[in-house]
Amino acid sequence: MALAVRDPFTSLIKQLDTDFDLLTRRAFGVNNRAGAFVPPADVHRDGEDVVITLELPGVDTDGVDVEVSERKLTVSGRREAGTEDGAVFRELRGGEFRREFRLPEGVTGDNVEADYDRGLLRVRVRGVVRKPVEPAKIKVRGIEGGAVS
C-alpha cells in the first residue's frame, strides 16, 4: 500500500492564485476566455477631451468597429492568430476582442473620432472633461421672526 503525503499549503497557494486571478479579471473587465487576445489600453485626459489608446498590432482596421451606445464606447474586432505549422512555442494571441469604456451622459457619436497609426488605435472623445461647477450659496427666504404658519 502506497502512502500519499499531501502538503496543505501547496494546494492553498494554488487556490489563492486562481481566486486572485479571477478577482482581477472581474475587477478590470477582462472577461474574455483564457488565452484570448485582449488589447491593452491607456486612457488619459487632453484638455477637455479623453483619449483612449489601444494596442492593435497586426489588426486590419477594416475589421475594427468603434461604437457609441447607451453611455458606452465599444471597440471590437478580430486579430488573426499565426497558423504556422510546427510551432514549438506560441505567445501571440488572436481571435475576436471587445473592450468597453463607460461614457458620461450626453456623449454621442458626434463627440468621437478614431485614427490608427503604427499599431495604435487612438479614440478621442471630445468635450468630456468639464470644469467643476463652483458651489453657490442659496439664501433661504422665510417669514420675519422665524414663525411659519
Image (cartoon, grey):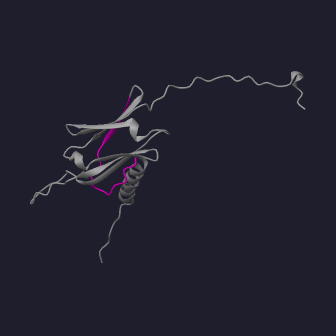
Q: Where in the figure is residue 59, as x and y percent of width and height?
A: 21, 47
Residue at position x 44%, y 33% in the image: 128
- Give the quadrant of residue 4: bottom left
Near-viewer residue (44 or 73): 73
Q: Is residue 36 above or below residue 109?
A: below
Q: Main secondary structure of the magenta part?
A: loop
Q: Where in the figure is residue 56, as x and y percent of width and height?
A: 24, 43
Residue at position x 23%, y 48% in the image: 62
Near-viewer residue (85 or 23): 85
Q: Specify whether residue 43 is painted magenta.
A: yes
Using residue 88 as the reference point, say whether residue 115 is left or right of it.
right
Q: Where in the figure is residue 73, as x and y percent of width and height?
A: 39, 44
Near-viewer residue (110 or 1): 110
Using residue 89 as the reference point, say whether residue 78 is left or right of it.
right
Q: Which residues are magenta?
A: 28-45
Q: Specify whether residue 137 is painted magenta.
A: no
Q: Is residue 122 visible to us here?
A: no
Residue at position x 29%, y 74% in the image: 2
Q: Quadrant of the N terminus?
A: bottom left
Farthest residue to the front: give it.
110
